[in-house]
Image (spheres, helix red, strand yellow):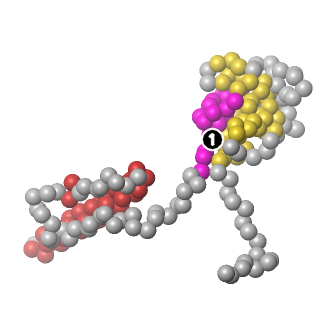
């Protein structure tokens, strides 16, 4: 068995989840990836997430990481700061006035007029990114010259024994090939008509 060199550094695995905020305020729109356990939100210069609006309190809200078990977590938004001081306008979360809420994918939090963020929870698929060997064993490419002219190329059937993800990949590749074949057929017809003139 071969051993890895002692001084070889291992890259840490990428996290299987990503927490993202799309923030909109008086300065425009921006995105922020959440990775810290606590964030203060407000218009104060010391806040971790600064919101540009006079409708936002200096310390408007707090985001706190909350474990969901199995290594997954989400963020809970709480009105005000960690000392219990609440904001002047409160929080409107998905259209409801709430003091705290465990954020879920695509939750919208409004702090005031034209000041809000949308939370996104992105889970990374631990499956390999490359298709497994033999994914195209059941696909037969047809030469257009020898194909049955009574059956259109668009009616190619794909066996349903594959998982949906693999089927989608196969369908996209077949559609790409069909598009290429149709393009070549149109070019050949155009070339023939130009030669005959």
Which residue in the rendered view is the most extreme toward the right? 83
Q: For this view, does 174 lie left or right of residue 132?
A: left
Q: Decide: is 49 above or below 130.
A: above
Expressed as whole percent of the image width and height from the top left, the position of residue 99 reads 75, 20
The residue nearer to you, when weighing 56 against 158, is 158
Can residue 48 be spotted in the picture?
Answer: yes
Which residue in the rendered view is the most extreme toward the bottom? 2
User: Label 1, on which residue?
Assistant: 121
Can residue 51 be spotted in the picture?
Answer: no
Expressed as whole percent of the image width and height from the top left, the position of residue 140 reads 26, 66
Magenta span main SS: strand
Residue pictured at 64% horizontal, 18% vertical: 96
The residue nearer to you, when weighing 26 against 160, is 160
Expressed as whole percent of the image width and height from the top left, the position of residue 75 reads 72, 36
Q: Is residue 123 magenta?
A: yes
Residue pictured at 37% horizontal, 55% vertical: 162
The residue nearer to you, when weighing 83 against 124, is 124
Task: Tell me the magenta residue range.
Answer: 102-124
Q: Is residue 141 magenta?
A: no
Residue pictured at 74% horizontal, 38% vertical: 67
- Label 1: state its secondary structure: strand
Residue 60 position by quadrant: top right
Q: Residues within 10 Å of mark 1 (few under 14, many from 20)?
A: some
Residue 1 position by quadrant: bottom right
Residue pictured at 12% horizontal, 63% vertical: 148
Expressed as whole percent of the image width and height from the top left, the position of residue 37 reads 80, 41
Q: Tell me the quarter of the image containing the C terminus.
A: bottom left
């Amino acid at each position: 068995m071969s051993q890895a060199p002692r001084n070889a550094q291992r890259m840490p695995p990428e996290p299987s989840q990503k927490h993202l905020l799309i923030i909109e305020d008086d300065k425009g729109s921006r995105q922020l990836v959440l990775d810290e356990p606590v964030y203060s939100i407000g218009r104060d210069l010391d806040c971790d997430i600064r919101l540009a609006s006079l409708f936002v309190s200096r310390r408007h809200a707090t985001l706190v990481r909350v474990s969901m078990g199995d290594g997954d977590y989400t963020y809970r938004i709480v009105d005000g700061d960690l000392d219990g001081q609440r904001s002047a306008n409160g929080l409107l979360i998905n259209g409801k006035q709430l003091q705290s809420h465990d954020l879920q994918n695509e939750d919208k939090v409004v702090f005031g007029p034209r000041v809000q963020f949308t939370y996104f929870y992105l889970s990374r698929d631990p499956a390999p990114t490359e298709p497994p060997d033999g994914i195209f064993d059941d696909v037969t490419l047809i030469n257009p010259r020898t194909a049955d002219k009574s059956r259109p190329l668009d009616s190619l059937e794909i066996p349903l024994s594959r998982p949906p993800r693999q089927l989608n990949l196969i369908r996209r590749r077949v559609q790409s090939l069909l598009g290429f074949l149709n393009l070549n057929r149109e070019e050949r017809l155009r070339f023939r008509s130009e030669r005959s003139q």
